[in-house]
Amino acid sequence: MRAGFLFKEVRIGLRRNLTMTLAVMITVAISLTLLGVGLLANSQVRVMKDYWYDKIEVSVFLCGTLSESPSCSGGPVTAEQRNSIKADIEALPVVDTVYYESQSEAYVHFQERFEGSAIAQNVTQDQLPESYRVKLIDPTKFAVMQSAFAGRPGVDSVQDQRSILEKFFKLLGVLRDGALVIGLASVLTAALLISNTLRIAAFNRRRETGVMKLVGASSFSIQLPFLLEGVFSAIVGWMFSTGLLAGFKLLVDSRIAPLLSFTKFFTWSDVWVASGILLITGFVVSTFASVITLRKYLKV
Amino acid sequence: MKFARKKQKEETMIRFENVSKIYPKQNHAALDLVNLEILKGEFVFLVGLSGSGKSTFLRLVLREERPTSGEIIVAGKELNRLSAHKIPELRRQVGTVFQDFRLLPNKTVFENVAFTLHVLGYSQKEINREVPEVLELVGLEEKSNRKPSEMSGGEQQRVAIARAYVSRPAILIADEPTGNLDPATSVGIMKLLDRINREGTTVVMATHDSKIVDSMRKRVIELESGYVIRDQVRGVYGYAG
């Protein structure tokens, strides 16, 4: 079978089954878009983790006059303790950088953060603890810091900002998983629709396929036009889904990003990667659904 | 001696050896231990009542069914050993024509005939050469742009014959080709089949039409309840001959 004749047959098939063809295209477009939103949600969680984990620190608060923990029973931290703590922090392989925040710096930061509120006026410099702010190479390695410094004389407490973010990311993870599950379920729906559409198409064209069989067409050449119809519809659906995802990205950039300045958003390359995954998904799923259906309904 | 050599040279087109076919859930055989041989260039009528096994015979030749037991050889192929992907090769050697024509209603006469060649991978150039030639053979060269619905039954059957014959198969199978046609039209179709037979194609025609069988005086194989009850070289429809 020559390509020209093959494509003519495919075109006739698509046109004759126009409403079903449109139904397949739209279903594929929607299901791939949903799956794409799931993939972008995944990218978004990753981007936010990168962004936030890069900013968060482990704070090693040193004993001050108001400290009450048992390790501060010896009174405020001494210069000697302060130096040995710093040396030990720097010696840990998980530590990236360390800086020291003195009471006066803590006071300045505090005033900045609570500017204009009553609490800012009531706090004095010596009420705020001095601390080491530690950035870890791998922000998940907090336990190492905790076990090395919690309870050490001169150390009041060791705090991980990550624990605050953890709950937030857990919530985002659930949302992302939900989006992926919905996406996959709708891709399954699309596969079933493709299968049913091809079954109807095969039934509508049983005369043609009967004649092809009689004159000695191979199974492959009988099934190929149908297969190409299924895949073609899926590819058109994929184009729409990529368009919708690009639109979603534009919407996020123009409307949502300005409102939520505390985080970064997924990039265009995340959109293209998601689109590539969707293309492969659409191609594989439509081919798979077509081949299984056609093997069943178009036997030689 | 001379006769024996001539016999050896003749090529077997269809050979059934002890072929039986029992369909599932039926207690009697559609074909029962059938033995027969059809040679290259023969014209054979297959006669018998409905349910006598004619259609089963044709379906077995086309490998649409497999025999329950026995050996079938068609155009040099042992069908029992023919793998599924070789079936198309068999069918390219066997043209088929039916009572109901089975033309594609959305295609013109030319396109219907060309369909075979497209499926078999012929180039447009070859198609433009072969199709008019075969349409001329069946006498429809003037009507190549008509749709089947605009033609008479006899003309539609001619198109079907052209489609079956355009790839020059070794065997042409016709299952009641005149079943839907009036006697005068039937004569024209028989002349056409005879002409195709004279060009060297083996023709096997299943029919109920006693007048046609009687007038052609060709080999007649009669089936009854799955048995070959008669195989005459120059036979007639009933027992009269």
Image (cartoon, grey):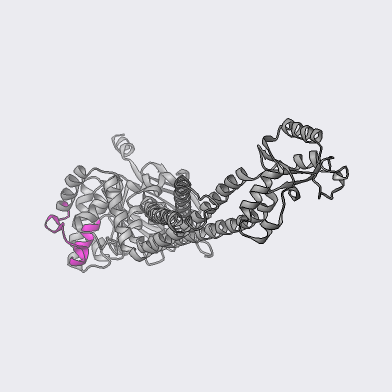
Please name the predominant secondary structure of the magenta segment in the image. Answer: helix
**Residue nearest the observer in this picture, B164 or A119:** A119
Q: Locate residue A31, reporting x and y percent.
A: 47, 59
Q: Is residue B25 left or right of residue A20?
A: right
A68 within the magenta span: no
**Residue nearest the observer in this picture, A243 or A101:** A101
**Residue nearest the observer in this picture, B144 or A88:** A88
Residue A78 visible here = yes
Q: Is residue A274 left or right of residue B142?
A: right
Report the label total: 0
Q: Locate residue A17, reporting x and y percent.
A: 34, 63
Q: Locate residue B42, reporting x and y percent.
A: 28, 48
Check the image and report above or below for A17 versus A125: below
B150 within the magenta span: yes
Extreme residue toward the left, this view: B142
Point out the stretch of residues depicted in magenta.
Answer: B137-160
